[in-house]
Amino acid sequence: MATLEFWADYICPWAYVARVRIDPLIKEYKNSVKLEIKALPLEWVNGVPTSRESLEAEWWVAAVHDRRAVFGLYRDNTFPNTAIPVFRAGKAALLQSYDKFLEFDLQVRRALFQDGMDISKVDVLLSIASRVGLDLDRFRKYMDSEESLEAVKQDYEQGREKLDPQGSHSFVLPNGKHLYNPAAASITWDRDRIVGLNPPPCIGSNCDEIYRLLFEISK
């Protein structure tokens, strides 16, 4: 079976939009293409955590790309200044079940961008893990282990070799071709401020064929 790699940070609104868009395709192509979700911690790529200011600048720009990816106000009293616990939790979910990991992955992204929750909190991650039917004892044990951290580090090192730029989100096709943030607006930054914005090539379901093509090419 062919593998299509999806490299993404959890604290990334563009990755959330793309993840919602490709969710039906993961199921449709399950017998020919496997989506492999890889850890791309932008805080390691950039050397600093994603700031709340830069995330809030992108939040509503990403939100208008697709109404199926529901965005809400950020409501928690703390902000996730690291995604490393989430990546480790994802590795713990994958260890139990690929299908449950896919659901966990999507629910975590929704928890941040739709429900406004601090996804770096252990209780938030445990609640989502319970909701998708994971064994919580096994989940917590592996999430807290050195093995989960090492698995995230391995993804990061692979990403340094495969991705140029190391941006979230990125697809890598079986032939090695890298596509960075397809079907999204092009943004110009000045530190944490957006100072330029080109319109996206498509909006909503009109973008579906772009993502379908990725799965078709990967077969």
Image (tube, rainbow, N blue to C red):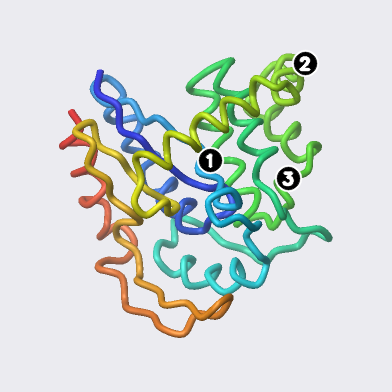
Q: Cα distance, mark 1 to mark 3?
A: 15 Å
Res. 192 mark: none
Instruction: Tell me if 102 is positioned left or right of 149 in this view.
Output: left
Q: Earlier in the sequence, mark 3 or mark 2?
A: 3
Residue that appears at 37% across and 39% down: 161
Q: Nearer the viewer, mark 1 or mark 2?
A: 2
Q: Quadrant of the C terminus?
A: top left
Q: Cα distance, mark 3 to mark 2?
A: 19 Å
Q: Mark 1 — residue?
A: 106
Q: Position of residue 156 (x, y in %)?
A: 50, 38
Residue 107 falls in which quadrant of the image? top right
Q: Earlier in the sequence, mark 1 or mark 2?
A: 1
Q: Residue furthest right?
A: 77
Other residues around mark 3 within 10 Å, as few (<14) / some (14–19) / many (≥20): many
Seen from the viewer's position, the closer of residues 130 and 8 is 8
Instruction: Tell me if 46 is positioned left or right of 5 in this view.
Output: right
Q: Are marks 1 and 3 in contact (CB under 8 Å)?
A: no
Other residues around mark 2 within 10 Å, as few (<14) / some (14–19) / many (≥20): few
The vertical placement of 69 against 154, above or below, is below
Q: Mark 3 — residue?
A: 120
The vertical placement of 10 against 184, above or below, is above
The vertical placement of 13 against 173, above or below, is below
Q: Earlier in the sequence, mark 1 or mark 3?
A: 1
* Amino acid found under the numbered disc labelled 3: Ser
Q: Mark 2 — residue?
A: 137
The secondary element bearing badge 1 is classed as helix
The secondary element bearing badge 3 is classed as loop
* Amino acid found under the numbered disc labelled 1: Leu
* Amino acid found under the numbered disc labelled 2: Asp
Residue that appears at 33% across and 54% down: 180
Residue that appears at 29% across and 31% down: 28
